[in-house]
Amino acid sequence: MRVVIVWAVSTLTMLVLAGILPDFRLQSSDSDSVTRIGLTAAWGAGAFGLLSALVWPVLVRALLLVPALVLGLLVFFLNGSILLMALSLIPDGRGAVAPETAVVVAAVMSAVASATSTALAVRDDEAYRRRLYRLADRRRRRRRRAGAPGEAQAAPGLVFLQLDGVGYEVLRRAAADGLMPTVADWLERSHRLTSWRTDWSSQTGASQLGILHGSNFDVPAFRWYEKDTGEVMVCNRPTSAAELQRRAVRRTGDAGLLTLDGASRGNLFSGGADQLALVLSVAARRGRDNRSRAGYFAYFSDPANAVRTALSFTAEVGREIGQSLRSRARRTEPRVARGGLYPIIRAFATVIERDVVVAAVIGDVLAGRAAVYADLVAYDEVAHHSGPHGGDTDRVLARLDRSLALIARAAEHAPRGYRFVLLSDHGQSPGETFLGKYGLTLKDLVRAGCGLPVSRRAGGTRSGAEARAAVLAALHRPEDEGEEARPPAGSDPVVLASGNLALISFPDLPGRATRRWIERAHPALPATLANHPGVGFLLVDGEVLGPGGASARLDVPGAVEELLAPFGPGAADAVRRTDSFPHVADIMVNSAYDPVSGAVHAFEEQIGSHGGLGGEQAHPFLMWPTELSDPGSELVGAEAVHVVLRRWLREADGPQVPLTDRPAEDPRQEPDPSGSFPSTGVPAPDETR
């Protein structure tokens, strides 16, 4: 009945469009009766729907090497071509349309058909449930016939959903204020919540590497300079992410958290999973070996998804432009520039990446996979430019909650039970940027302290959020650092920003600089930095320097704890751990922190930032079902979170045997070329559900 209704609505849509558009007709030149025109429209609508169902899988296989976002645009033109084919099948040549008009007609018809089908499914709850059950049952029977491992047992699976950048207090407030009713319901009925403490480098690269691979050793920041290679490592650059993953695997001797029947979705690292979608550590691969990009193709293989996501994408771009204009008109402070490509990058993170990742997770639970880890980056991207608190981020949190509800609803029809673990990788601390507050960048301050010329025109440091790298990877342009990837040879210091943490390296000096060498080569630099009101403290050669000449050696118990007390408990231990890294910078700079307001000063152009010590950025959350064991009274560092998650996997499905005979990023089996997750047939995770 739903098929008949959708067909009827598509027919009516085609009739309306034929009456509106001058280059689209459904009758012969001699004119036809109303009945004849209606039958022609029904024939055309039916042929268009049938061809869409049959031709799209073939087209997707043929277009695997096309950049993913190009495919999203190409869908419209391919859809128009299918409409031309459908009209050519109408007897007596009664259907005709100009090619450019065909694109519009096909897009409108796909959107209307999708909206009608979704509306019927939403309003008929039993029909929706039956549809999901049939999909899950069909997949379960196929896996049984194929002798898939684990099919004979009904052990529950685990879905780890990372809400990127959502701090512990932000989640609590959102649940209490009704912004996230799904989270609030889980906390009331079935889940518990705690906070954990990040390492000094409070950013996704360090946290997610530790969570998924059990080691984030020698990751001092989001970006850092390595003297032995002369290169800058950047956590969201695909080649750097791949290298960091290899180092973690070598250090632990383990492929990762998701080695056994796992899926990694929207992450920087694979976690050892075979099923990948939008995973940055494999995005640098060219050709068909890049399994991560297949997630886009599996999603856009349904033209209705492309149309719906395109409409939501356009609406989000408009929403960002409107919010930015209101912020300027009201003279909101602090404020950063939100022009250029940022509205597109934001829309990518909050619409395209969200839709693709959510659809992938739904496919995973319907396929019955044992462990899924997915990262939803929408909040983090918006908070960087709008601040971690306010109406902009509140709306993002509400949409994320609806995504959680959709995944949970799909899991009710999965071939196995599922337990949901929510967590975040870091929080966000508010505050005016270093440049906005003091009128110069940290790089300018360093050059002044070294006696080097300083540019008269202050320029900001580009934001290093994950969404930009994901956009470039989707466009087959994963490398976009230019000279920043390999600074030119010379004696000028290399200054790199990671939120409110900055790293200064002297490239012409082998090994780590001593404090004596720095004071001899650049006598004014240490005091210039330590006494600046925007700087909280420095780490130089195993010694912490603070304002007013304060200093404390890390190997002297108690002294560093007292000096770093304003930055919260555990700050001294976090600094000690980073000091032991082979690639720690010659000078590590943490911005000032106001314990009353919770504000820091990012060295990048971000008014919601993370990366160093100070405030909510260091306090993400962990939320788990009560059936699992308690994680403990205090979790310190991402590696400790990895231990807890691995224990929960053992509790759910018996001992997890790590596979160490292959690199984590090398898959054991080839995916379906049409995508790395099965086609679910589930309505896309649009914002109306």
Image: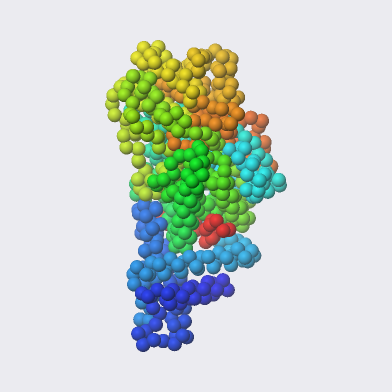
Q: Looking at this rendering, what residue extends furthest in the left direction?
A: 489
Q: Nearer the viewer, residue 130 or 391?
A: 391
Q: Quick check: 53 above or below 410?
A: below
Q: Which residue is rendered at x = 59% and y = 45% of the image?
A: 158
Q: Which residue is rendered at x = 44% and y = 87% of the image?
A: 33
Q: Return the x and y of residue 119 as percentages of the image width and height.
A: 57, 65
How many marks the image carries: the answer is 0
Q: Quadrant of the C terminus?
A: bottom right
Q: Quick check: 42 above or below 126?
A: below
Is residue 118 in sight in this rendering? yes
Q: Nearer the viewer, residue 266 or 21?
A: 21
Q: Return the x and y of residue 561 as percentages of the image width and height.
A: 58, 18
What is the image's colouring? rainbow
Q: Nearer the viewer, residue 518 or 355?
A: 518
Q: Return the x and y of residue 409 as percentages of the image width and height.
A: 61, 55
Q: Which residue is rendered at x = 64% and y = 47% of the image?
A: 183
Q: Quadrant of the N terminus?
A: bottom right
What is the quadrant of residue 667 in the picture? Answer: top left
Q: Return the x and y of residue 17 as percentages of the image width and height.
A: 44, 74
Q: Nearer the viewer, residue 58 or 79?
A: 79
Q: Looking at this rendering, what residue extends furthest in the right direction?
A: 189
Q: Which residue is rendered at x = 41% and y = 43% of the image?
A: 469
Is residue 656 in sight in this rendering? no
Does residue 547 appear left or right of residue 525 in this picture? Answer: right
